[in-house]
């Protein structure tokens, strides 16, 4: 019986500070000092060791800092994060991938929950977005989003394709002629269907 | 029998406490990560612009030239200069390495300048100059 107690005590102590937490802390240290590639690895390892979906979002934030916004957008997924800091990074990923309306929506929704420093950064980004989208959207801009979205869906990156289609739809909708809006809707439906099919296969 | 019951109770208490500790440790780690993320949360240096297929391709090519090949040359030269500074190599080696770094830096800056000029010609806001960054 004492052996059993010792075993339980040992496993309890081990579980109290598990390897996943160690990797999260290592990742935090690396991120804070600007070693984003290292942080990315640590967060991915933490996720594999069971740190949960939060670790995936931390890895996505590292990808944003590594200027890999499309991968970051995919890793964040379509749903808004509960934490405002993560939501800021999700918006940043959208912004860097030129998904302006996606970034603006995310920032707008989280605006009241940011800390004082982050809220200033968010305001700066939103002002830049509004300035970028102030003029009339040219057809070739929408062409670009549709082409990018089509390529993404074709390549199996349905989440990314969906976001590009949404952006094309939102920007097309700003024009009086709703340029290629029907095609954007069709691409959106295609991306959703492909995502559902891939989900069903899992 | 009493010993058995006491042991079982102790084990259950330990397991319960262990779970709570583990949860605390995870929460603390998460808080630490979020603090780190918040400390680095800022708007990007390069402001993205609306894309269009033709100018996008041109910019991509320019960017590869100025920040890809020449950027790599500059980084390599800077590293060589740093290494030469650190070890006990002679003054001539240090001078040569520094000169190489200087030349590569000038070439890279010129290419970046050309790229920004091209961006202005195409009517898109020019990207920021790469001041002293590798």
Image (cartoon, coloured by chain):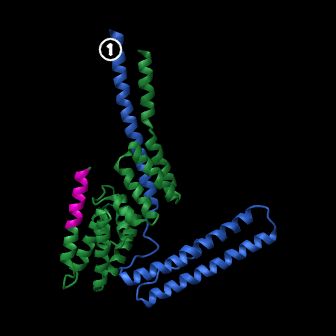
Q: Quadrant of residue B7?
A: top left
Residue A31 visible here: yes
What segment is highlighted magenta in the picture? Answer: A189-201
Image point 34% across, 61% down: which residue? Answer: A74
Position of B28 relative to B73 (above/below): above
Residue found farthest to the bottom: B121
Image point 70% across, 75% down: which residue? Answer: B100
- Image coordinates of residue A45 in percent, x first then y, are 44, 48
Instruction: Determine whether, in the image, residue B88 is placed left or right of residue A30.
Output: right
- Image coordinates of residue B85 in percent, x first then y, are 74, 65
Residue A137 visible here: no
Q: Chain B colour?
A: blue
Which one is nearer the viewer's eye here, B109 or B23? B109
Which one is nearer the viewer's eye here, A29 or B108? B108
Q: Tell me if mark 1 has few (under 14), some (14-19) or many (20+) residues whose alpha carbon lies within 10 angstroms of its own.
A: few
- Image coordinates of residue A131 in percent, x first then y, are 34, 81
Q: Quadrant of residue B96?
A: bottom right
The residue tagged with tag 1: helix, strand or loop? helix
Report the quarter where the N terminus of chain A lies.
top left
Position of A196 relative to B84 (above/below): above
Secondary structure predominantly adopted by residues drawn in magenta: helix
- Image coordinates of residue B97 in percent, x first then y, are 72, 72
Image point 43% across, 61% down: which residue? Answer: A63
Residue found farthest to the top: B1
Image point 40% across, 35% down: which residue? Answer: B21
Which one is nearer the viewer's eye here, A79 or A104? A79
Kindly identify which residue carries mark 1.
B5
Verify whether residue A125 appears in magenta.
Answer: no
Chain appearing in green on the rendered image: A
What is the chain letter for disc 1? B
């Amino acid at each position: 019986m004492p052996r059993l107690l010792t075993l339980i005590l040992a496993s309890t102590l081990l579980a109290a500070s598990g390897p996943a937490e160690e990797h999260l802390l290592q990742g935090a240290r690396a991120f804070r000092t600007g070693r984003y590639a290292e942080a990315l690895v640590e967060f991915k390892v933490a996720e594999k060791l069971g740190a949960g979906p939060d670790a995936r979002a931390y890895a996505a934030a590292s990808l944003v800092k590594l200027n890999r916004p499309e991968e970051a957008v995919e890793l964040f997924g379509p749903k808004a994060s509960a934490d405002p800091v993560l939501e800021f990074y999700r918006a940043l990923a959208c912004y860097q991938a030129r998904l302006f309306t996606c970034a603006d929506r995310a920032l707008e929704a989280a605006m009241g929950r940011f800390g004082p420093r982050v809220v200033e950064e968010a305001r700066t980004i939103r002002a830049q977005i509004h300035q970028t989208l102030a003029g009339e959207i040219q057809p070739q801009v929408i062409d670009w989003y549709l082409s990018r979205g089509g390529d993404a869906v074709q390549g199996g990156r349905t989440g990314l394709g969906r976001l590009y289609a949404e952006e094309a739809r939102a920007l097309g909708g700003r024009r009086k002629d709703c340029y290629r809006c029907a095609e954007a809707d069709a691409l959106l439906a295609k991306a959703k269907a492909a995502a559902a099919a891939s989900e069903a296969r899992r | 029998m009493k010993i058995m019951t006491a042991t079982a109770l102790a084990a259950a208490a330990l397991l319960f406490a262990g779970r709570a500790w583990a949860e605390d440790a995870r929460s603390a780690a998460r808080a630490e990560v979020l603090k780190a993320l918040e400390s680095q949360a800022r708007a990007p240096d390069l402001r993205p612009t609306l894309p269009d297929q033709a100018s996008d391709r041109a910019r991509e090519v320019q960017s590869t030239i100025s920040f890809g090949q020449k950027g790599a040359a500059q980084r390599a030269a800077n590293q060589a200069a740093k290494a030469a500074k650190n070890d006990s190599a002679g003054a001539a080696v240090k001078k040569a390495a520094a000169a190489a770094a200087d030349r590569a830096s000038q070439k890279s800056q010129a290419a970046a300048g050309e790229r920004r000029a091209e961006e202005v010609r195409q009517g898109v806001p020019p990207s920021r100059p790469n001041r002293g960054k590798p």
